[in-house]
Image (cartoon, helix red, strand yellow):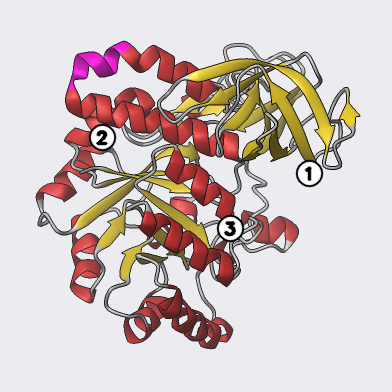
Amino acid sequence: MTELLIPAGSLPLVKTAVRYGADAVYVGGELYGLRAKAKNLTPEDMAEAVAFCHENCRKLFVTANITAHNRDLAGVRKYFTELNEIGPDAVIISDPGVFTIAKETLRAEIAIHISTQANNVNAETFKFWYRQGASRVVCGRELSLAEIAEIRSELTDDQEIEAFIHGAMCISYSGRCLLSNFLTGRDANLGACTHPCRWQYAIVEEKRPGEYFPVEENERGTYIMNSKDLCMIEHIPELLAAGIDSFKVEGRMKHALYVATVTRAYRRAIDAAKRDLDEYRAMLPELVREIATCESRETTTGFFFGRPGSEAMSYTGDGGAEPSVYYGTVERVCDDGYCEFTQKNKFCVGDTVTFLKPDGSNVQTEVLSLQDEDGSEMSSCPHPSRMVRMKTTILPEIGDVMRGE
């Protein structure tokens, strides 16, 4: 079975990922992961997330992939002792010192996965980590599909390979970057990256085709260079043929609409490609359109088909397709025909709302009534993060993610 591994920055997002088709979910705790700015999970949330995943026959992994300093090691040991009680299925580690502590501290049932941050780009590196006791190694993002297939051919079936197939790309070697630290004092290797590489500006003093960056004609002025996001939804058969055991999506700082849309699309794509390639090809245009509804950047295939050049960057300032608006996730369905949710963006009575269903269907419905949490009628819900009661022409289900078209 090919695993679909989905990110979640909170307990509700863990549940969204599972509902929309994840085989496994990876989260960060409040310490020692590389998304310190994400909401992340408290120990109590993580324990509930583990229980929820296991009740639904899914797995939960915890990131602990910082590049640790000496001052971090005592805390890492304490943290792993606490994880023993919580019982995730695996921890994701990049630092050899942290790995050593994990081997000494974690129960045998908790697997150790080696993060892409460890720069795993050759078969001997993979074999080294398996010999130390790791059960899975995450491919460096600089590997092509041909290289991954070659590495796979040198490993045994129980030596698992994981690879990122969707999400933001880093300009640095497997994410090992000092740019954020240099510019802002926030260390990317300790989880505090500010992504200063994502938008860059180039000033062109005169018209010089191709000199400053590869566009056909540069007019005088300021240009925005925007790094594209990885998207492999159109290449699932090639990913399967390379022998990758786990398809990983990036995005622990994303909202529920991203998690639901991307998870559902890749779940359908993987299942269809394994059943019948003609079925996969037939549904592909729909899946590509769905992915585009939650993306704000243009997409690329990264290093999978060779070293990317200028095509991995956008030089126009455009962010790709206009994304849909995330309204909220249904938290409760009431006997009086209303549903309740925490509002994320404004919409009004009379607007059309789309409920995303795990089976791939999108149910459009009209908003008939909106109420605040006290039951007072509202014409719109203008204030994010407040509880809203809503009646629509079609009653949703708990866990339905809502979007505006």
Amino acid at circle 2: Leu
Marks 1 and 3, how far apart at CA: 22 Å
Residue positioned 21% across, 37% down in the render: 146
- Looking at the rendered structure, the secondary structure element under dot 3 is loop
- Quarter of the figure with residue 108: bottom left
Amino acid at circle 3: Arg
The numbered mark, 3 or 2, whose residue comes first in the sequence reads 3
User: Mark 3 — residue?
Assistant: 35
Residue furthest front in the image: 335
Q: Quadrant of the N terminus?
A: top left
- Rate crowding at label 2 as few (under 14), some (14 to 19) or many (20 or more) other CA atoms within 10 Å: many
Q: Is the Cβ of the residue at disc 3 closer than 8 Å to that at disc 2?
A: no
- Looking at the rendered structure, the secondary structure element under dot 1 is loop
Front-most of residues 172 and 88: 88
- Give residue 44's position: percent from left, percent from top: 57, 70
- Quarter of the figure with residue 164: top left
Residue 200 in view: yes
User: Mark 2 — residue?
Assistant: 239
User: Mark 1 — residue?
Assistant: 385
- Give residue 35's position: percent from left, percent from top: 58, 58
Magenta residues (range): 276-282
Residue positioned 50% across, 48% down in the render: 15
Please, is residue 128 above or below residue 347 in the view? Answer: below
Residue 38 relative to residue 95: left or right = right
Q: Is the Cβ of the residue at disc 2 closer than 8 Å to that at disc 1?
A: no
Residue 170 in view: no
Confirm whether the magenta stretch covers residue 323. Answer: no
Confirm whether the magenta stretch covers residue 278. Answer: yes
- Rate crowding at label 3 as few (under 14), some (14 to 19) or many (20 or more) other CA atoms within 10 Å: many
